[in-house]
Amino acid sequence: MTNGDSIVSSGSPSYGMIKTETQGRVAVITLNRPKALNALCSELFHEINDALARFDGDEGIGAVVLTGSERAFAAGADIKEMKDTEFIDNYKNNFLGHWVEQIGQMRKPIIAAVNGYALGGGCELAMMCDIIYAGEKAVFGQPEINLGTIPGAGGTQRLTRAVGKSKAMEMILTGTVNLNASEAQAYGLVSAVFPPEKLVEETIKTAAKIASKGAVSVQMAKEAVNQAYELNLSSGLHFERRLFQATFGTKDQKEGMAAFSEKRKPNFVHK
Ligand code: CO8
């Protein structure tokens, strides 16, 4: 951190499977279920969602980092937990539907810092984030086909958009073709690769940089980029222009442009 702050526990003793910390305006959520390689059981996902909701609603936080251990970001949904569930209950109870709810609603940027395995639901969780950084030994894959099932939290959609149809088909249909960190970067799935021990630190630096900008324009920029996946070009350009115009109603736009003109650093107030 440029301001020299040390990492401070933001305190939530009720979490048993994640750790949360804040560093300045950055929140860090660390998946902490090492014996199961951070397999995403229901309790773990509820904790992730709870922490995300808390940080999204905290004005003192401008960006969130989501990470795991050096061995595993997450090795997928918890196979042991779900293996005996039945279609009719899964359908009626919208099994694992809550996975996508909070991350999809997040207004603040989330950066995934992926070391080790990001398989199945773990790869999907990383792809739900806004930016993915990887450690050199990261492994991205969708092995669900080996279990007699298919990706269920965005793998067939987000991976295909990220790496193209042929590679996504190869990964999802074989369940054994994975991407290492440099391949994932070459495909554009991840935007930077770091030595494993530097990954979280470097990710926090980027998150801090984002969190130092005006929070309203950061949220609007995130919203506009995400519309690129939903809208045709003319609707997307229209959406972008309206948000661009709206930024002129914020204090931060006045401050940012005044600071440029006065050759000084802006002092954003996130309003
Ligand atoms: N679920 C449950 N436990 C797991 C999982 C998992 N996904 N992955 C690893 N573990 C456990 C192992 O069972 C083992 O536990 P134990 O010591 O009690 O036997 C422990 O973690 C360590 O694992 P390994 O001994 O296997 O470690 P290795 O280093 O030998 O292998 C691997 C690491 C390659 C990652 C291996 O563990 C593996 O293949 N794991 C399964 C990967 C996988 O298939 N993931 C996909 C799961 S399905 C899924 O994610 C569907 C998502 C759908 C979302 C739907 C939303 C609507």
Image (cartoon, rainbow, N blue to C red):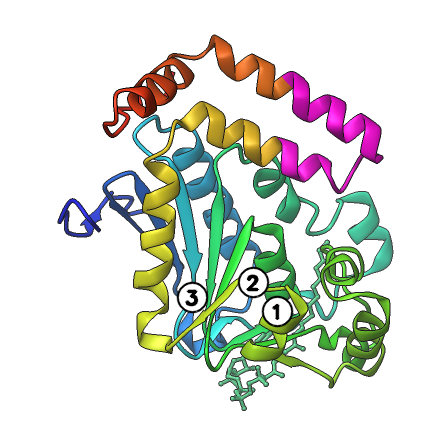
Q: Nearer the viewer, residue 265 or 175?
A: 265
Q: Amino acid at mark 3?
A: Gly
Q: Residue at x 51, y 77 (%)?
A: 138
Q: What secondary structure is found at the residue carrying circle 3? A: loop
Frontmost residue, 244 versus 82 = 244
Q: Residue placed at 48% from the left, 82% from the top?
A: 137
Most frequent secondary structure within the magenta stretch: helix
Q: Secondary structure at mark 1?
A: loop
- Measured as percent of width and height from the top left, residue 85 is found at 75, 62
Is 252 located above or below residue 204 in the figure? above
> Considering only order in the chain, which callout, 3 or 1, is on the residue closer to the N terminus?
3
Identity, as a three-letter code, of the amino acid under mark 2: Leu
Q: Which quarter is ligand 1 in?
A: bottom right
Disc 2 residue: CB within 8 Å of ligand 1:
yes
Q: CA distance from mark 1 to mark 2?
A: 6 Å
User: Any mark on residue 76, and which?
Assistant: 1
Q: Which residue is mark 3?
A: 68
Q: Position of residue 270 (x, y in %)?
A: 36, 21
* Mark carried by residue 40: 2
Q: Quadrant of residue 184?
A: bottom right
Q: Are marks 1 and 2 in contact (CB under 8 Å)?
A: yes
Percent position of residue 127, x then y? 62, 57
Start-end of magenta stretch: 224-242
